[in-house]
Image (cartoon, helix red, strand yellow):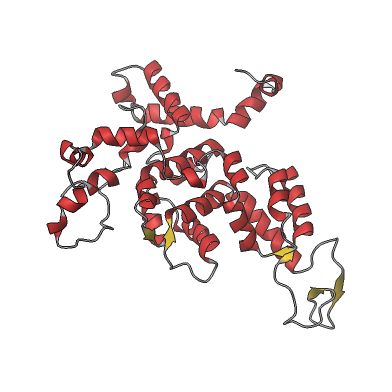
Amino acid sequence: MLSPDRLAQSGPDYLAQRHVLTYMEDAVSQLLENREEISQYGIARFFTDYFNSVCQGTHVLFREFSFIQATPHNRASFLRAFWRCFRTVGKNGDLLTVKEYHCLLQLLCPDFPLELAQKAARIVLTDDATDCLMSFADFLFAFQIQFYYCEFLESVATIYQDLLMGKSPNTVIVPTSSSGQHRQRPVPSEAATPEGVEATLFCQCLEGLCERHKCSCPPPALLREVLSGAQRLTFYEFLLALAKHQGINRALGALPDRADLMHDPPMDEELEKLLPPSSRLAQVPGLPPPSACGAEGGGQSSRTPPRVASPWRPLHHPRRPDGESEGSTEETDESEP
């Protein structure tokens, strides 16, 4: 159904907002790269399959990082694919390090940068404890904020540092004697200096940033809601509040609420079809679960890495409607002796 706002847009504005040219360029590039294979079933079918894949969000699987971050839709699709593929990590209660989560990200995007995973870990663990274990839910929601709003957060970090240095027109500046540095007034002593920045002033700066920022930003009303409960806060306290805020998660639209994070009935149905018949014996009343039947395995670790199919490039001819299921093999592997 066409909305009034969509009808009011000019053609170029609509194409730019929806990044249509980005997808057209990518489709044509894949068409030329795979023209011999595509010629067997036709160009029209190729474009149909390609844009169906874009609509379903499976077009980002096993693609290069430059492509998965190219549009907001690509970023949201990648977040949803990562959640669906590795949801069993959370269901099993496993705690992983940032390097292990980075390995999972690389299963879907081979050149995914470690730096983004490390930045997400700092939100959960603070800046000086990035080697600790994290739950899947904590990492996922922190990663969502860091990945989707990457450019916005870089600008926020600059604003935060400026406020710490007193570079705000709303702050009284008192120059020191000869160092050329500035500090906020009053400052009785360094030990008594409060941590972080004033939340009200910080909020005003972020609202101005949202008005002029060209990349994706959280809704200003939700930013005000996040900052309304604090007088002062640090940068990482702000990021953690964003990651935990249910309204921002819903506005982004890639992940379910935290309470529903482990539930995905459509994916469960797909996984059930992939399970071998022996693993379904646990559903028969009176029979022990498969884990109990495999006790003679000598106490093998429950964190054995899953076997995942080798990465493959463009989904120009998908053979199943939901491509994410190819990355979710943990439940299948756990059922094998």
Residue drawn 42% across the image and 64% down it: 133
To which quarter of the image does residue 275 belong? top left
The residue drawn where x is 42% and y is 20% is 48
* Picture coordinates of residue 276, whole percent (x, y): 18, 37
Q: Is residue 328 visible?
A: yes
Q: Position of residue 301 (x, y in %)?
A: 24, 61
| Name of the residue lying farthest toward the left | 296
x 21%, y 42%: residue = 282
Q: Quadrant of residue 189?
A: bottom right
Q: State whether residue 53 is above or below residue 118.
A: above
* In the image, residue 268 above or below residue 176: above
Residue 223: x, y in percent? 69, 49
- Residue 214 location, x and y as percent? 67, 42
As drawn, 299 above or below 324: below
Q: Nearer the viewer, residue 163 or 313?
A: 163
Seen from this angle, which residue lies furthest front?
286
Quadrant where the image shows the N terminus: top right
Position of 6 with respect to 81 (left or right) is right
Vertical comparison of 337 with 182: above or below? above
At x 40%, y 62%, the residue is: 97
Q: Give the total number of marks visible in the rendering.
A: 0
Q: Nearer the viewer, residue 273 or 160?
A: 273
Of residues 12 and 273, which is closer to you in this image?
273
Q: Is residue 313 visible?
A: no
